[in-house]
Image (cartoon, grey):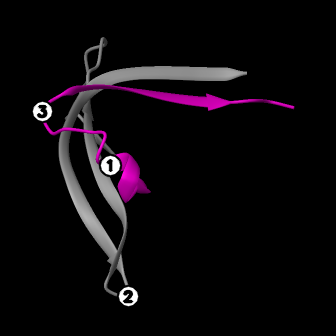
Amino acid sequence: MVKVSLRGECTNIQLTTSNGVPARCLVRLEMDHDIPLTYGLSDVQILVPAEFATLFEVGHPVTLTLEQNRN
């Protein structure tokens, strides 16, 4: 199993629509890095159901965990 956890901050939340109906939100996160980078910080963008997006607030810290099971 591989598990990566990153910390950062929510920088933007944008509602997207499907045929005029609010369906999901694009949540943009700017992640912290503990290692020096030779390039600029990359944002992470995720699409989530609108109900989940209401749980996030711009400017607040977030933790993003990516997990993969190798079966």
Q: Quadrant of residue 36?
A: top left
Magenta extent: 46-71
**Outermost residue to the left:** 59
| N-term mark: 2 or 1 | 2
Q: Which residue is identified by label 2?
A: 19
At label 3, the amino acid type is Gly
- The answer to whether 67 appears left or right of 7 in the picture is right
Q: Gap between marks 3 and 2, in whole Å?
A: 30 Å
Examine the rendered structure and indicate whether residue 71 appears above or below residue 37: below
Q: In which quarter of the image is residue 6?
A: top left
| N-term mark: 3 or 2 | 2
Residue 35 image position (x, y, % from top left): 31, 13
Q: Nearer the viewer, residue 71 or 10?
A: 10
Dot label at residue 59: 3
Q: Which residue is identified by label 1?
A: 53
In the picture, the quarter occupied by the N terminus is: top right
Residue 45 image position (x, y, % from top left): 34, 49
In the picture, the quarter occupied by the C terminus is: top right
**Outermost residue to the bottom:** 19
- The answer to whether 34 appears left or right of 11 in the picture is right
Judged from the image, the secondary structure of the residue bearing numbered disc 3 is loop
Residue 40 shown in magenta: no
